Amino acid sequence: MVVMLAIWQGLSAAFGTYWIGSPWGVAARLASGVVSGETLRHASYTLLEATAGFLIGGLPAAALPFALRRLPIVTAILDPFMVAGYGAPKLALAPLFILWFGIGIESKIALVAITVFFIVYFSALAGVRALDSRLVQMAQVMGADERDLARHIVFPGAVPYIFAGFRIAMPYSIGGAVIAELISANRGLGYLVQLGAMNFDTTAVFVALAATICIVFLGNWSVNAVERRLLRWRPRPGLDVQGGS
Amino acid sequence: MATEALLEVRGLSKRFGDRVGRDPSPWVIQDLSFVVNEGEFLTIIGPSGSGKTTLLNMLAQIDTASGGEIRFQSQVAPIRDPKSLKPGLACKIGYVTQEDNLLPWRTTLQNVLFPLTVQRRLNDETRARAQMLIHAVGLAGFEQHYPHELSGGMRKRASLIRTLVYDPPVILMDEPFGALDAQTRTQLQEDLLRLWNLGRKTIVFVTHDIAEAIALGDRTLVLSRSPASIAGEHCNPIPRPRDIRGIMIHPEFGALYHRIRVQVQ
């Protein structure tokens, strides 16, 4: 951390703050932006877009593979579309969404949602497919019906996979929101980046990036907190007693 | 034996891959016939790879036979029709598998209560029975532990009482103590016999250990090498209650061991 800051300070001194804002300058601007509420206002707008898009895209994506578990043919039909959707560059979709949903918050949420959806869908699908058939047989012998299997065996088994998807999708949701704002917006951290660049104010660009990274840390922390709660049953890395699953 | 046959296997055969587009593999089980009487502790012994697990899977109806007949009470199991299988026959057949197959996301207590939960039979009486069993096998104090926090022997105990807790009339056991050290294994055998004495379930216990088959069973069947069929049948003259730790010095043990030994190849 200290080394990174020293390198940053050194680069900033070598090239001048015109090209690279100094860490001290960025921190001061960030602090004054937070105090005046200006940076905070833009950041919360971006956070709102990212959170809404994350939930709108992520929750259906996590649920869909469960609905499709007993329908292998439908899953197979959907597969090429899912692969296409996963592979399509989301940045290229941004202009389309602006056409469809306008330049307001809806188009940003749509871009985030579509980005998150495919990442989480493929993770949840892997989780449903990784199902241990011996556990299913055991439960059936004990009298479990389809609903019991879904609730007690398939879902808990897939939770680690779904959270792996959430963890990967989370920075993408914030990045997606910032990129959508870069293209067209009058609010948000992406707008701040754009504004800073137009005014040749690199420090402002760095401030916006620093704020974005803070949101990523916050998001990561939230995903970790929820995951820790849901996965209490897992052996903690490093404290593994039995080396079990 | 004057008692009635509860489970009857006649001319049973099995080979895998009898599906369209796949060549059938060699027979795993061929022309296997035996009966299991009500309240009997039957042990089946056979070399590894002799189709013991396959046999139990068919009895538990999680796999289909390729030919022959399996009759439980008056119900006949479907042949070559996996879709009509009824795993566990509406909870009448319990199955303690080789691996413990505990649900890693449930605590010991939740795992033991799992069959009662899915059978919608969770009440004060069944909860008390679960607690009694947990105490009986020495898992008291570990109710809130997750499976990865238990030792191998404790997991086996949890897996065993998870089947005992819902009291199925027949229990199949597939080398449940196979992967344990000798001391733990003897302890668990004693636990099992003690629990069996409480209820006198019908048990079909598969093992590759001759001493274990003699120590536990009323009757022992010997399976031949693949394709499996019955190579021999031995009634066990050692009276109950038995002393598992001293079973080897019982006067009947040596002769019986030897008779089984020559049939197990």
Image (cartoon, coloured by chain):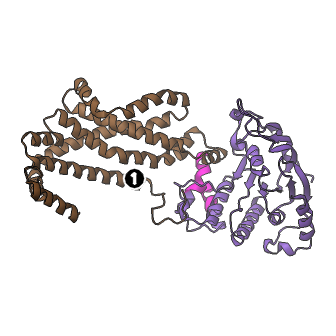
Q: Is residue B130 visible?
A: yes
Q: Colour of chain A?
A: brown
Q: Is residue B123 visible?
A: no
Q: Nearer the viewer, residue B216 or A238?
A: A238
- Name the residue that disc number 1 marks: A227
Q: Nearer the viewer, residue B240 or A165?
A: A165
Q: Amino acid at mark 1?
A: Glu
**What secondary structure is the stretch in magenta mostly built from?**
helix
Q: Is residue B226 above or below residue B243?
A: above
**Where does the magenta region start and end?**
B110-131
Residue B72 in the image: x percent, y percent? Answer: 80, 42
Residue A165, how many percent across, how many down?
Answer: 40, 45
Identity of the residue drawn at 65% across and 61% down: B156
In the rendered structure, the colour chosen for chain B is: purple
Instruction: Identify the chain of the residue marked 1, using the numbered disc in the image.
Output: A
Q: Residue at x 49, y 34 (%)?
A: A67
Relative to the observer, which residue lies in front, B156 or B218? B156
Horizontal side of A206 relative to B69 (left or right) equals left
Q: Is residue B257 magenta?
A: no
